[in-house]
Image: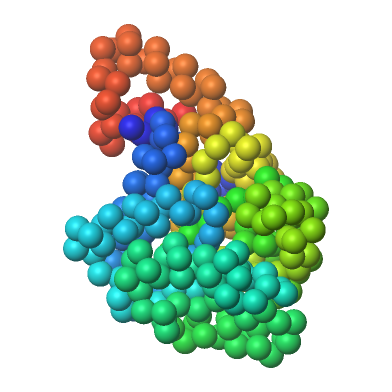
Amino acid sequence: MILRDSHHPTAPALRGPTVRVFDSAEAAAEYAADLVLEALAAAPGAGLGLATGSSPQRLYGALARRRAAGADFSSLSGFALDEYLGLPAEHPESYRSVIERDVIAPLGMDPDRVHVPPATDDPAVLAAFDARIGASGGIAVQILGIGGNGHIGFNEPGTPFSTRTHLTALSDSTRRANARFFDSLSDVPTHSVTQGIGTILESRRILLLATGAEKAEAVATAIESGITIDCPATALQLHENVTFVLDSAAAGASRCWPVCTAFIHIFRSTLALDARDTSPLTLATLAL
């Protein structure tokens, strides 16, 4: 069930992100899958921007169910956001391996059409990766997660918004967060190659999927604070077509969320609205 459907203007000249809040991570992923299919249909020939992590993994599972129902991803191009430096491609936690396991196989994509940033610091090679995105028709929709410090891709706080695909050092907090995928913190790579914020912002549409209370503060900052390199996700306020898809836990730190949920409960009780009513008219009336 969708709990919140609203639009957050960030400044008079900016459209601001659309925010959709659901009562579970699974429901958020199902909605996000439909949004991905809609964006791909609206931009034939453009590619899919691929993120990794637990929230996107649920989304890929939902897309796999749509494949079983008839969706065809075999001719779709895909571009991953990032790759660790120093991990062999065959390492189970390299993003090449993760993408093969979580995306290519379940969605029936052509491995030759799915590209992961090259693990190198060679500027010419990295520039060629960005050029390949453009030559392939660009990105119809970029899937993003968000780090606890507000990073998108591996663009850590302090990253200029104009950056292209580049080599970056991972923050201590990012390495600690990713240590759950490795035997120990010392095994987590210290550097990665990531699509830059400038690269990400060239996508036609951006979908940020976040679930869990540990993401709540970063989500609230990304949506409600001023635009600042101290929180890379605030750069998304500069894009004209961004949707945040959240579960209620990830939305919990938003300043307006507790008021909104109380208002919705009172409003529906007063007017005897069905709690399951998510018609556009009802949602527009309820939006703060």
**Residue found farthest to the top:** 270
Vertical relation: 217 (above or below) 206: above
Q: Which residue is drawn at 33% across and 11% down?
A: 269
Which of 137 and 125 lies nearest the eye of the viewer?
Answer: 125
Does any portion of residue 60 appear in the rendered image? Answer: yes
Q: Which residue is drawn at 74% across and 65% down?
A: 189
List x then y, in percent, for residue 201: 56, 66
Q: Residue at x 48, y 24 (%)?
A: 260
List x then y, in percent, for residue 193: 68, 72
Q: Which residue is drawn at 25% across and 69% down?
A: 72
List x then y, in percent, for residue 149: 71, 47
Q: Which colour scheme is used?
A: rainbow
List x then y, in percent, for residue 164: 66, 75
Vertical relation: 164 (above or below) 254: below
Which of 138 and 211 lies nearest the eye of the viewer?
Answer: 211
Vertical relation: 29 (above or below) 187: above
